[in-house]
Image: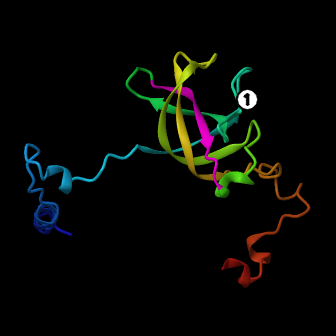
Amino acid sequence: MNRSVSILYSSCLILLISICFRFESDPSQDTFRQVMPEPQAPVCTMNGRVVPQPKGVPFNIHGWRSFDVRTSYYDNSVQPGKHLSYVIHWFLPYSPRWQKFNTPAAGTALSLMGRLLGRLNEKHPSEPSSLLAFQVLSIDFIPERSSNLGSSPSSSSSSVSIRDRPASSWA
């Protein structure tokens, strides 16, 4: 795509977006609340590992079971950049969907999506402040690496070269 077509395409897209998402309400009018959606709690997606909860933290609050997950992010605002880790407290709601679900064991790698509930009142011993609390909306278990991934093909009895695989295994 040449530059003039790209600029034209970008201009048309911006024009289309501004036409489709025109906001014609005035916040000072009474009808503003009818046009705007209700506020929603933020939703977060993260990966991390389950860590043991500190002693004295209740596992079950009004039927909502909980567990802690440690995750990290890369902070490039400091030089040199570094990984900073933190803990988030996750709650499984008291509902039929989560009733038979076992809370994950310490060390389990997870991918989680959840809705922000707020901040816990109690401070976590390993953190500088109290933890954020999230309600689990979805949870996926991240499989651990196999112990023979790093081994050479000659040392593994179950290794199969690409040429030896039948064509049907490429589906």
Q: Foreground: 166 or 144? A: 144
Horizontal side of residue 77 vs 67, given as left or right: left
Q: Foreground: 21 or 70? A: 21
Horizontal side of residue 133 vs 49, given as left or right: left
Which residue position holds label 1?
Answer: 52
Q: Residues within 10 Å of mark 1 (few under 14, many from 20)?
A: few
Q: Quadrant location of residue 153?
A: bottom right
On the image, the x and y values in percent for residue 79 come to 41, 20
The residue positioned 87% from the left and 58% from the top of the image is 154
On the image, the x and y values in percent for residue 121 come to 54, 21
Q: Quadrant location of residue 160?
A: bottom right
What residue type is disc 1 on? Pro
Q: Main secondary structure of the magenta part?
A: strand
| Quadrant in which the N terminus is drawn | bottom left
Position of residue 85 relative to residue 164, above or below, is above
Q: Foreground: 108 or 89? A: 89
Q: Quadrant location of residue 158?
A: bottom right
Horizontal side of residue 5 vs 124, given as left or right: left
Position of residue 16 relative to residue 142, above or below, is below
| Quadrant in which the C terminus is drawn | bottom right
Q: Secondary structure at mark 1?
A: loop
Q: Foreground: 33 or 159? A: 33
Q: Outermost residue, right direction?
A: 157
Position of residue 87 relative to residue 11, above or below, is above
On the image, the x and y values in percent for residue 122 come to 58, 19
Picture colour scheme: rainbow
The residue positioned 66% from the left and 57% from the top of the image is 96
Magenta range: 81-95
On the image, the x and y values in percent for residue 51 come to 70, 31
The residue positioned 68% from the left and 78% from the top of the image is 170
The residue positioned 89% from the left and 54% from the top of the image is 155
